[in-house]
Amino acid sequence: MHSAPSVSFPVGRSRFAGHLLVIIWTAGACCAGAVCYQFESVEWRSAALLASVLLAGAAAGLAYWRQCTGELHFDGQGWRLAGADTIEAARLLPALDLQSLLLVRLAAPGQRPRWCWLERRSAPHHWLDLRRAVYSRAPSADPADPIAAVPQRSASRGPSPSSS
């Protein structure tokens, strides 16, 4: 069995994630506007509702602006993000796979996890290599690692000792 190839892939702000944030925030703002329209007068509840909509919009904008950017590297052993937020010796766990778009969690010991959107359009010629690396099981030296502790089945399909 072959191991996943070494790969480098650019990571940037995702247009999909930006559009998704805008759509969700717009839907919430429309609902809040409809509720405020139903109130007969401007009360503290409508002011609090509008303030929460503005706060949610600011939080969504900040989340979009703080998306991880840089170059994601896989060397066959582990992941590394080089850029504004350098992360060394990290584990990459896929959270959402939409075939041409991946949402992954990059976790390194002693650092807070980072969420990254990976899009095929960033580097289409490296996309399949990236997907192979994401779903490969890199060797782990940590015996407490639950993924590494799972024994691998042998490739041969000979008779089992209990069948004789």
Image (cartoon, rainbow, N blue to C red):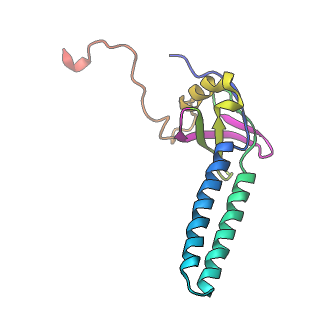
Where residue 114 sits in the image (x, y, percent)?
66, 48
Residue 71 falls left or right of residue 164: right
Residue 59 location, quadrant: bottom right
Residue at (67% x, 25% y) in the render: 124
Residue at (53% x, 38% y) in the render: 97
In front here: 62 or 46?
46
How many numbered markers are drawn?
0
Q: Is residue 61 above or below residue 106?
A: below
Where residue 83 sits in the image (x, y, percent)?
80, 41
Q: Is residue 61 above or below residue 14?
A: below
Q: Is residue 37 visible?
A: yes
Residue at the extreme left: 164
In the picture, the quarter occupied by the C terminus is top left
Residue 63 location, quadrant: bottom right
Residue at (62% x, 60% y) in the render: 26
- Please check the rendered image and state whether residue 39 is part of the magenta-colored stretch, yes or no: no
Residue at the extreme right: 84
In front here: 160 or 63?
63
In front here: 70 or 159?
70
Where residue 77 sits in the image (x, y, percent)?
63, 29
Residue at (59% x, 38% y) in the render: 102
- Please check the rendered image and state whether residue 89 is part of the magenta-colored stretch, yes or no: yes
Q: Is residue 62 above or below residue 132?
A: below
Q: Is residue 109 visible?
A: no
Q: Magenta residues: mostly which secondary structure?
A: strand
In front here: 141 or 146?
146
Instruction: State the extent of the magenta-drawn residues as a range.
Output: 78-99
